[in-house]
């Protein structure tokens, strides 16, 4: 079978299951956010969505691995996986270009205009008394909109929650995930090059 030009798998229910999973996940996330501060059990829908997603991914990936171990995937199909991953990485690069491009636009154009600079200056139209400065850590009305320095700072997390507040501080976990994942993926890659599959699976997982 592997000598055929291209392996076309049989019809699968996994795409439909994943679509249903994503619908459940989105509904759960939206209802959970909208019910914050109430006694709603909407978070159960979100948990169900995550469980459905993990279950679907487990069985779908298991099927793909089974097909590969059976010799159904030839070099052409393997190349398609490589191209697909390359396009995925390219889309991530473009996302970061767009993100930092928007940040550059805000820093270079929007903030000065809001402060009254240039022909497009609109000072006192959107927020009277706004002064252009960077970084924007203080809002014009701190009582109405807290700035990031007050809302997300380490000191604020510790003051309001002590150790529990620090452990729930999102920037801390984001940084730890970023740093540890770069180390574990590097170790997994080294074990893959050494054909040490058990350690590769361990560090990749």
Image: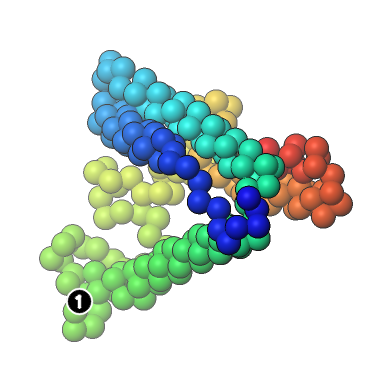
Quadrant placement of the C terminus: top right
Q: Dot 1: what SS?
A: loop
| Residue at 84%, 44% in the rendered image | 196
Image coordinates for residue 160, horizontal then vertical, percent: 46, 29
Q: Which residue is farthest bottom?
A: 119
Q: Residues within 10 Å of mark 1 (few under 14, many from 20)?
A: some
Q: Name above or below for residue 114 compared with residue 57.
A: below
Res 89 seen here: no
| Residue at 55%, 53% in the rendered image | 7
Closer to us: 70 or 39:
70
Residue 116: image quadrant is bottom left
Image coordinates for residue 12, horizontal then vertical, percent: 44, 39
Count the labels in the image: 1
Q: Name above or below for residue 43 compared with residue 119.
A: above
Q: Which residue is farthest left?
A: 125
| Residue at 80%, 37% in the rendered image | 198
Q: Which residue is mark 1?
A: 121
């Amino acid at each position: 079978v592997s000598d055929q030009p291209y392996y076309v798998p049989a019809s699968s229910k996994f795409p439909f299951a994943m679509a249903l999973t994503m619908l459940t996940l989105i509904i759960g996330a939206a209802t959970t956010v909208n019910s914050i501060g109430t006694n709603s059990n909407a978070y159960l829908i979100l948990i169900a969505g995550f469980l459905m997603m993990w279950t679907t991914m487990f069985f779908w990936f298991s099927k793909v691995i089974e097909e590969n171990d059976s010799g159904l995937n030839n070099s052409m199909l393997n190349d398609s996986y490589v191209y697909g991953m390359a396009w995925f990485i390219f889309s991530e690069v473009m996302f970061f270009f767009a993100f930092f491009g928007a940040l550059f636009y805000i820093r270079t154009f929007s903030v000065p205009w809001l402060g009254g600079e240039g022909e497009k200056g609109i000072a006192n139209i959107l927020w009277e008394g706004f002064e252009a400065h960077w970084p924007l850590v203080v809002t014009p009305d701190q009582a109405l909109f807290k700035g990031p320095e007050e809302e997300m700072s380490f000191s604020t997390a510790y003051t309001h929650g002590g150790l529990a507040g620090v452990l729930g501080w999102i920037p801390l976990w984001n940084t730890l995930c970023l740093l540890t994942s770069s180390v574990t993926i590097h170790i997994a890659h080294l074990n893959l090059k050494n054909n040490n599959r058990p350690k590769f699976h361990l560090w990749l997982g």
